[in-house]
Image (cartoon, rainbow, N blue to C red):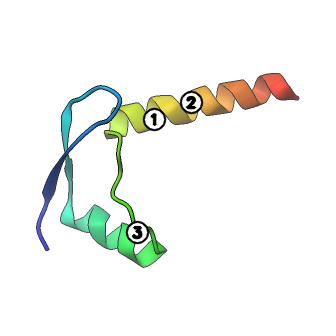
């Protein structure tokens, strides 16, 4: 297994899906590769947390 270059579905930027990350995904049972770069994943997670705070 080797590092893979993927393209973020949100910003279109290329990012590296490292061999270590692939191993982690496999150990957790995840079948799909990430679709967003780390920056977009972080932003999306923060956005979800913020919107959940308004629901309470």
Q: Are marks 2 and 1 in contact (CB under 8 Å)?
A: yes
Please identify the quarter of the rendering in which residue 26 is found: bottom left
Question: Does 18 sit above or below residue 30?
Answer: above
- Viewer-side label of 2, 3: 3
Q: Nearer the viewer, residue 12 or 46?
A: 12
- Look at the numbered disc 2 and give the secondary structure of its residue: helix
Query: Between disc 2 and disc 3, whose residue precedes?
Result: 3
Badge 3: how crowded within 10 Å, few (<14), some, or many (20+)?
few
C-alpha gap between disc 2 and disc 3? 24 Å
| Left or right: residue 23 compared with residue 13 | right
C-alpha gap between disc 3 and disc 1? 20 Å
Q: Position of residue 14 (x, y in %)?
A: 17, 37
The residue at 29%/25% (across/down) is 11
The residue at 39%/32% (across/down) is 40
Residue 55 is tagged as none
The count of marks equals 3
Please identify the quarter of the rendering in which residue 13 is found: top left
Q: Position of residue 27 (x, y in %)?
A: 41, 77
Q: Which residue is mark 2?
A: 46
Which residue reaches farthest right?
56
Q: Which residue is mark 3?
A: 31
Badge 2: how crowded within 10 Å, few (<14), some, or many (20+)?
few
The residue at 28%/66% (across/down) is 22
| Left or right: residue 14 compared with residue 23 | left
Query: Between disc 3 and disc 1, whose residue precedes?
Result: 3
C-alpha gap between disc 2 and disc 1? 6 Å
Question: Does 19 sit above or below residue 56?
Answer: below
Q: Which residue is mark 1?
A: 42
Q: Position of residue 19 (x, y in %)?
A: 20, 66
- Look at the numbered disc 3 and give the secondary structure of its residue: loop
The residue at 40%/68% (across/down) is 31
Please identify the quarter of the rendering in which residue 56 is found: top right
């Amino acid at each position: 297994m080797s590092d893979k270059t993927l393209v973020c579905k949100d910003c279109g930027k290329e990012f590296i899906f490292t061999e270590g990350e692939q191993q982690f995904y496999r150990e957790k049972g995840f079948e799909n590769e990430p679709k967003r770069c780390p920056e977009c994943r972080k932003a999306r997670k923060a956005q979800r947390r913020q919107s959940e705070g308004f629901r309470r």
